[in-house]
Amino acid sequence: MMKGSMSVLVNRQILLNSRPQGEPKPEDFRLVETKAPVLGEGQVLCRTIYLSLDPYMRGRMGSAKNYAKPVEIGGVMEGRTLGEVIHSNHQDFAETDLVLGPGGWQEYFSLPGQALRRVNPEWKPISTSLGVLGMPGVTAYTGLLNIGKPQQGETVVVAAASGAVGSVVGQIAKIKGARAVGIAGSTDKCQYVTDELGFDACINHKGANFSEQVEAACPEGIDVYFENVAGMVFETVLPFFNNFARIPVCGTIAIANATELPSGPNQIHMLLRQILTKRLNFKGFIVSDFSDQEEEALTTMAGWIRKGKLRYREDFVDGLEQAPVALIGLLKGANFGKLVVRVSDDPTRSS
Amino acid sequence: MMKGSMSVLVNRQILLNSRPQGEPKPEDFRLVETKAPVLGEGQVLCRTIYLSLDPYMRGRMGSAKNYAKPVEIGGVMEGRTLGEVIHSNHQDFAETDLVLGPGGWQEYFSLPGQALRRVNPEWKPISTSLGVLGMPGVTAYTGLLNIGKPQQGETVVVAAASGAVGSVVGQIAKIKGARAVGIAGSTDKCQYVTDELGFDACINHKGANFSEQVEAACPEGIDVYFENVAGMVFETVLPFFNNFARIPVCGTIAIANATELPSGPNQIHMLLRQILTKRLNFKGFIVSDFSDQEEEALTTMAGWIRKGKLRYREDFVDGLEQAPVALIGLLKGANFGKLVVRVSDDPTRSS
């Protein structure tokens, strides 16, 4: 465990170098070396162990007004991190504590104590606190149960079904007695989704006859479509929505890199017509809208994991410098499971 | 009051002659003379006094699957009617009773007793039972309060603001302490909406700088947009939606006559992105989804009318044969107020 004097710490950071046009490229990021930050009153300095990579990061790289501010050009890329406290000016935290916070893409981060949350050491591996027992898991849990409200025997469809959010959505749907139909981008992923995660079906959206396969997998239509991709997948599933279907909207990764609106025809009014005639309910959300339910969600999901009812898969890359290429891959569906950068050693694994 | 023997009654009907391509034309309708129907067990024969004309009728003329079946070619055009009972085979109804039912576009209709509802004679003029105290009023009341949920000080926007539904939406918004901003298709209508109905503002969507005027009328953005038109108006108001805005969707009249999707760009994914980032809630509904609230809605609105808090305007045309041209005009915004066909004399007026 690194415990050197703070004054000698070199902090590698990845900055936003330029706003991407379309797909981000490696040149849109820049690796720099700086000194680790000097601690102010009430602040805590941490060594980054894990950095979470998530689809929302593409939005922060652009300049568009959003639910959060964009990262500034030259600013450290934002991201949730799991770190070990190496120095604390805050009474609630001490050296070697494991904490979560918005530390960003860097090897050391300092944050005010109130921005940190202690990692529950019973929930091992601790990296899950960035995935199934973290923001993605809580996103799936709160969006599905508050907006999707799957009922016994209904059909729930989710894309990116082998991913951090989609995998949890389908498994909770099953726990609630619904049918779960996944959509994923390869036969390997689809096999994992059905064989390992227990979905009733999973369809490869790159395969032939995608629409026919959706129809075949949903013989009684779609009651809940958990929207985390948009794009072609959304257009394909839309005709199969049942009356009174619920559509929680938490992501649009398929259009994240779009530089202009797709060509016509303009289907926006057709969608309004569908909303009316089928009495659809679309509701957007981000995980913080349900922050009061976070503890309940985490406790419940931790229990499901212990009982083997909720499974997950992590996809690690090693070294902070790999983060840009890994995020670029994530936006193309190249990862398989929750994508996490191992920035430095996990002390709970080395023991 | 006509009380002739049933056997001599000639019943004029308007049939659907052909499915319209784009805007309905007079040739899409056909006037025929038949004998008044013979009454079966439990049925009630009525003379049509008023026929309600409403935007949803355009949908029934097409072949598209919808929340209700299309009218068949050669079938009587559907419509809600207020009639006087002239013969009853049902114990709950007697001659001269005034009743409401789905009688269609004809001078006499017979329906099973359970399809009829007695008109509350205290709510005069009785024609309001097809408008503010009927389906359009209940649509406004239930959609606004169940889905829109306007809060004190919020901004509620509704189009077709001088119409049967829009006029009620804005006035209830005011009663609930919200700001009401209307959109209508002429300066006369806008003046009526602000001066007579008490909306805070009303914008002519045919006027110059429509978007700028929406922005000026909604300096704090839009919290509830009651969607009953779609089309250009929807595209114009969308950028001004606040976070967590609610959008009850009950009509898409602006695209009712569309024969193909409008040209691109395709904004459907931009809309999903807006739903996500602003956490919008779109929910389609039709009035029957809230049928358990109908009595409460009617009683409450009747009280508001008595107290002068809820005003309405009726737009009468005389004679069944005028119905086709009147409906064609309605779809173009030519009417001003709730459109009703006076098919025969109203006994409560002639007294």
Image (cartoon, coloured by chain):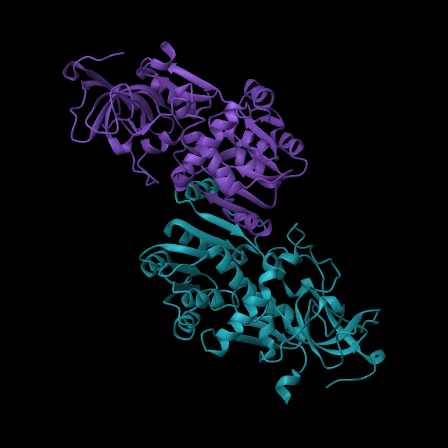
Chain colours: A purple, B cyan
| Residue nearest the viewer, comparing B24 with A33 | A33
Counting from the top left corner in percent of width and height, residue B68 is at 67, 55
Viewer-side residue, A11 vs B40: A11
Compared with B51, A131 (above or below) is above
Q: Is residue A58 above or below residue B75?
A: above
Task: Pinpoint residue A186: horizontal percent, then vertical percent.
Answer: 55, 20
Is residue B20 visible in this depiction of the protein? no
Asked if residue B327 lies left or right of residue A111, the reply is: right
Which residue is depicted at the point 52% across and 50% down? Answer: B283
Total count of labels? 0
Residue shown at 50% from the left, 68% from the top: B163
In the image, residue B159 above or below residue A73:
below
Outermost residue toward the bottom in this view: B351
Percent coordinates x, y for residue A23 in the rendering: 38, 26
**Residue B283 visible to the viewer:** yes
Please give left or right for residue A96 compared with residue B92 in the image.
left
* Residue B60 % position (x, y): 66, 58
Quadrant the C terminus of chain B occupies: bottom right
Q: Residue furthest top?
A: A351
| Residue plotted at (75% across, 84% down) | B2
